[in-house]
Image (spheres, grey):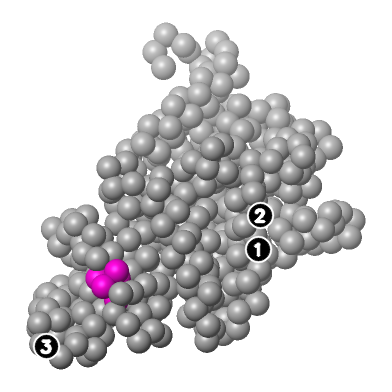
Amino acid sequence: MAGYPRSQAALDWAATQNDLGNAREKLGERESDTARLNEAIVAYRAALEERTRERVPLDWAMTQNNLGNALWRLGERESGTARLEAAAAAYRAALEERTRERVPLAWAATQNNLGNVLLRLGQRESGAARLEEAVAASRAALEESTRERDPVQWAADRAALEERTRERDPLAWAATELNLGMALERLGEREGGTTRLEEAVVAYRAALAEWTRDRVPLNWAAAQMTLGTALAMLGSRESGTARLEDAVTAFRAALEEIAHERDPPGWAEIQGNLGNVLMELGARESGTARLEEAIAAYRGALEENTRERDPLAWAAMQNNLGIALSRLGERETGTARLEEAVAAYRGALEERTRARSHSTGQRRRSISARRFGRSASGRAARRGLRRRSRPAARR
């Protein structure tokens, strides 16, 4: 900042600090390290020393929104919730000046950002309160509820949808439908019934009506993946196989865009989820074709989920492979498949030690064959859905 003295033009200095924060945040988004994001936070907070609410209320609100964006991105990379809580506080501060009456589109963008943060917080908490709030907000918005009808809990997604109508901004509308689906899926995962999951499927399909492959191919693929996991979870709770078949279709559709050469880790994660569904189908059928397909999918995933790259993910996939091989071996007269299953289990146990499981067991539940994967928070979905959940309105 040499040559641009703060004393000469305090507000111009603050504007440049804000712009510097934007550039650092963009760099931080593209880098695996968090240093740039932390630098962006420093720049935004410096800007807020001069961009006060009393002096320039809308600029203050814009920088609060930008600060929330950087905190949100940082919070997504950390295991705790402190950064996400701080992001929510920054967005709520911005909304004190970014009112619907004054700047409706900026208000809707910040409401949507707040909704995304609340969804992430709900995913990391054991209770359902945050998720319930997100679901209630989104559903009320789709019913065109008004602020007067529910002044206490006028939450983020409902508010955003009142401005982000399908007619005005179909892609943003689809993004908020997807947020609704993700919250419903999380709730459905924690509950025993199927109602929430069925509602999640409806929301995902609504999003796909606008997020078409021709228009936004990677978003379409990521939405197909989230649809697949909801259908898979739903199918695991029903006696029929129609939902599981639909899940296979959705995962294979996602693989048409999230190809091995384009996104190897994302491709591997979808292969693992596909393997889980195929194995469930194989367990319910008398033949061996589905189990063979599941084994092929797991082996495909293991091409990327190597032991060196991520030993616990590799061990989880080895365990899944062992289950599929064991089930196949039970239906064959020879012992080769069972021997392969034993080898896979032994490989998994080299990394899945008893001591390690106590500290890291919860981190890898998403790729267990006995639980259908939470792809909405997986690597592939994060890559595809980043375009959906990108924090909005920097300037």
**How many numbered marks appear?**
3
Question: Residue 354 in the image: x percent, y percent?
Answer: 19, 83
- 241 or 180: nearer the viewer: 241
Left or right of residue 277, residue 361 in this image = left
Q: Give the residue number, with chain letter if any, for mark 1.
A: 202
Q: Is residue 207 above or below residue 294?
A: above
**What residue type is disc 1 on?**
Val
Is any part of residue 134 visible from this angle?
A: yes
In 3D space, how far apart are the residues under numbered discs 2 and 3 (Cα atoms)?
A: 48 Å
Q: Residue at x 45, y 46 (%)?
A: 384
| Main secondary structure of the magenta stretch | helix
Q: Residues within 10 Å of mark 2 (few under 14, many from 20)?
A: some
Tell me which amino acid carries mark 2. Ala
Residue span colored magenta:
291-295
Checking the image for residue 206, the label placed there is 2
Residue at 48%, 66% in the rendered image: 247
Mark 2 and mark 3 lie on one chain; the one further toward the N terminus is 2
Q: Residue at x 25, y 60 (%)?
A: 301
User: Does the magenta segment cover residue 294?
Assistant: yes
- 289 in relation to 145, above or below: below
User: Is disc 3 surrounded by few (<14), some (14 to 19) or many (20+) residues within 10 Å?
Assistant: few
Residue 281 drawn at (x, y percent): 40, 78
Query: Which is more foreground, mark 3 or mark 1?
Result: 3
Q: Which residue is the site of mark 3? A: 334
Residue 332 in the image: x percent, y percent?
Answer: 19, 87
